[in-house]
Amino acid sequence: MANPSAPASAGALGASPLLLPRPVRNHLDALSREPAAPRVLVVGPAGSGRSRVLREIARRLGRDGRPVVTADAAATVDAAPAEAVVLADDVHTSAGELIAALARRVQTPGAGVVVASAPWPLPDPVRELATSLEKAHPPLVLGHVTRVDVLDACAGSGRFWAPRCIDDILELAGHLAWLVGEALVVHEQDCEDESGHPALREELRDLIAHRIASLEPPLLAAIETLCLSPGTLPLDEDAHWALAGHARGLLMRNGHPAPVVRDAVRATISVDRLFELYATPGRLPPDAEMRRLLSGFSDPRLATALLLDGDAALGRDPRRADELFRAAGEAGADGLAVATRRARAAWNAGEVDTAGAILDRAAVGPAHPSFPTATAITGAVWAARADLPMSSAVFTRADVPSPDLVAAGTIAAVGAGDAERLVELDAAPPARALPSTLVVAQELLVRGLRTTLGTRVPTCLSDLVRATEMYTASGCDAPVPEIPAVLATVAALSLGDLHVAANVISDAVRSRHGGAWAQQRLLLWQAWVAVQRERPHDAEAALRAAGVATTTPARERVLADAVAIALTRRYADPSALPPVWRRARESILRARFDVYSLIPLAEFAVSAARLGDMDRVQPHLDDAAAALARLGDPPVWSSHLHWAGLHCSIHLNRPHDLRPHARALLSAAPHTRLAATMAQAGRVWTEVLTGKVDVDAIEHAALGLASVGLAWDGARLAGHGAGRTDDRRAIARLLACARHLHPREVLDPPVGPVPEAGPSARGAEVLSAREREVAALVVQGKTYAEIGESIFISPRTAEHHIARIRRRLEATSRSDLIAKLRLVLEDATIPGDLRPSRRVERA
């Protein structure tokens, strides 16, 4: 050998060069120079060159005149001369007698011993032998090589490769010595490939596949899992697959397969083996690469596994679940089962119409196992389309008395006012289901809803709140006509318990009650509760978080519009209401209001009466009244509708229309606190309209309304009372009550750079916030009395404000005042939806 310290070159048969890490080569050189007999452990995975290193050591010892004995049995070791160096290969697989003999020789002073072993597994006697040898000399650790090691091997063998090729080879081979060596053997020295060496991957493929095929089944499955789905750990955590795979030369020390090994497995694994692995629960996740490998094949095992993986992905990623269900259909899964699951995925993704279209095309029949699920989805789809009567009709076609369908059918029947269906459900035989968390939630929900239809209502809210908590705990995200948290929230609002409503809806949003698809609806109801709690900024934040768009289901759009109208009517300039109402009319046109949506309907009705557009809402009010009548006019659900009827009658100046609503509230008063409060406030309001102003009674009624979530109405009542009396003390007291119940909040200014102050900005700085508020009403042509009624001040106070504004702006006439006010109110600190219209409207 020309250079004894260099690695051996390729042999005559084209063997791969011996690639040794630089520390190993340094130790080999040091052994040649040491006078003492060597005691060394050579350790490395399969193919790393352990045997070749032993031969190199034997060659060097022989060159130096030292006798060498190859240990093939315990007797050979025991009979070796004291001056000889005993070499033993693969001691990790050797018999116990041979290992014991080697251990005795290590204990002999001056005796030379060099053994080679795989890094794992190491029986205890071998481990003890290795520890003894490591005390004498650092081990020669083989297996992984670097760019420097390859370049040194090139210099020693006289073969040279381009640096970029060496880098590619090291990357592909994961720096595993035997793979790097095999790649160098087959690689052309004048390579011009700059695309990742695909030819090299193909040339190594069969060699790697042959080595993998010889693995024992557990390790084979582990290597295949790692290669087919990167990032997925093998199932058997006790198999020491990382150590075993590294010892066999197929995994790097960190347990990752070399890229060329991964490519070889993916390219050579049989379809049957793929099916077997994928059909093993939890073995392989359905990532994109697996779907590509499995695409185009039909097999029952594959279809079943794809369906199961799709079911698991529904809650996390419904669109990915849909891809898996499609693949299951291509693999031969039942078409109706696939369609039902795809509809569920579309529902979870918020694509309500897509879910309905899939089931429309599938036409799942009652005899099919998927029929109950298809029924539940279809019923939920119609509910999301704001058509709960159709949803109830869907559930009448499902005779399966499961807790799921009984609960869903009851929700739909109560919401639609379908009393006949409720009787049928009550007569249906109870389902024999284990009392799981979900079943308990459904039973509580059914009981709570039925209780709301009677007059003994104290327990209904408790049942509905408990049902909400149990439903959250169950983690259920199945399609339902209405989620329990919304039912509990609406019931609490309908009973005047604003605190419970706020807690229920906040907890539901925080815990993602009902799954991802339900979040938008929960946020919208949270916005509505914030409106009733006099928290407009919270309502706006929840409305923005809900992210209502043109693709949002009709039920959510109409609720979002109700929140927007409520905020505008209570906090914005009166001129802002008409455009918001015009946008909401489209949603109203496409909705059928049910028992659970009577509170938003009441908001629409009052706004319509105020704007003279009552004909658009009246059919919905008639339908709602008919639904309530079919249910027996339950006090829990009817009070808000009758309260809205009172206000509509007042706005429309129809005193005779007041009587039926007042009688209904008086009839319901003994049963709910909300109805009792409304009945009392309605009586006081009627007296105020006739000119009778009892300050104590008005204050008491206004505060009572505020206590049940109607602070805005209470403030309006106090304001009306102040406008109907000339007693200054009574006016001041009632206006103070109104301001206390409904503080006039202004929206935050838009975020952005502050423009240079112009004339309008300087004018805005002259006026206070209250004066700018008055100014906006002046520009609209409001009278002193109308200004006072709008912002809860007396007409005389409004007159004083206007006089001060005139002096500060140095206005010489009314037209000059209005012109200057228009400039002032263009100030950027006034929100766009609160700025007055340029058109002057006079009363």
Image: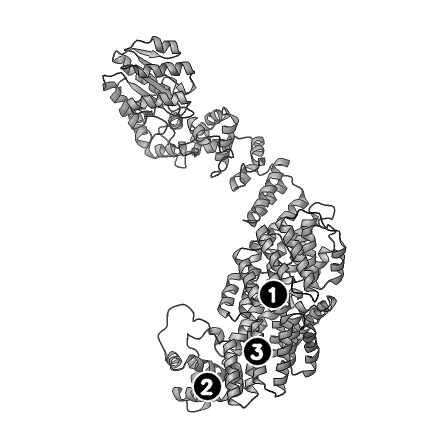
Query: What number of labels is visible?
Result: 3
Instruction: Tell me where residue 102 appears, x and y as whole percent.
Output: 36, 15
Q: Nearer the viewer, residue 279 or 811?
A: 279
Question: Does label 2 or label 1 sit earlier along the sequence?
Answer: 1
Q: Give the class, few, some or many, for how many residues have Cα within 10 Å of label 3's Cα (few <14, many ≥20).
A: many
Residue that label 1 marks = 492
- Residue 822's quadrant in the figure? bottom left
Q: Quadrant of the N terminus?
A: top left
Q: Viewed as shown, does residue 131 lie left or right of 308?
A: left
> In the rendered image, is residue 783 in sight?
no
Q: Is residue 502 above or below residue 292?
A: below
Instruction: Tell me where residue 285 appears, x and y as whole percent.
Output: 53, 40
Question: Does label 1 or label 3 sit earlier along the sequence?
Answer: 1
Disc 3 to disc 2, how far (Cα)?
35 Å
Q: Is residue 334 above or below residue 773?
A: above
Amino acid marked by disc 3: Ala
Amino acid marked by disc 1: Ala
Disc 1 to disc 3, how far (Cα)?
20 Å
Question: Residue 702 has which mark?
Answer: 3
Element class at badge 1: helix
Residue shown at 56% from the left, 72% from the top: 707
Residue that label 2 marks = 818
Amino acid marked by disc 2: Ile
Q: Nearer the viewer, residue 337 or 413?
A: 413
Instruction: Tell me where residue 295 appears, x and y as whole percent.
Output: 57, 39
Question: Does label 3 or label 2 sit earlier along the sequence?
Answer: 3
Q: Nearer the viewer, residue 465 or 4?
A: 465
Residue shown at 52% from the left, 71% from the top: 534
Choose mark 2 or mark 1, whichever is in front.
1
Q: Quadrant of the C terminus?
A: bottom right
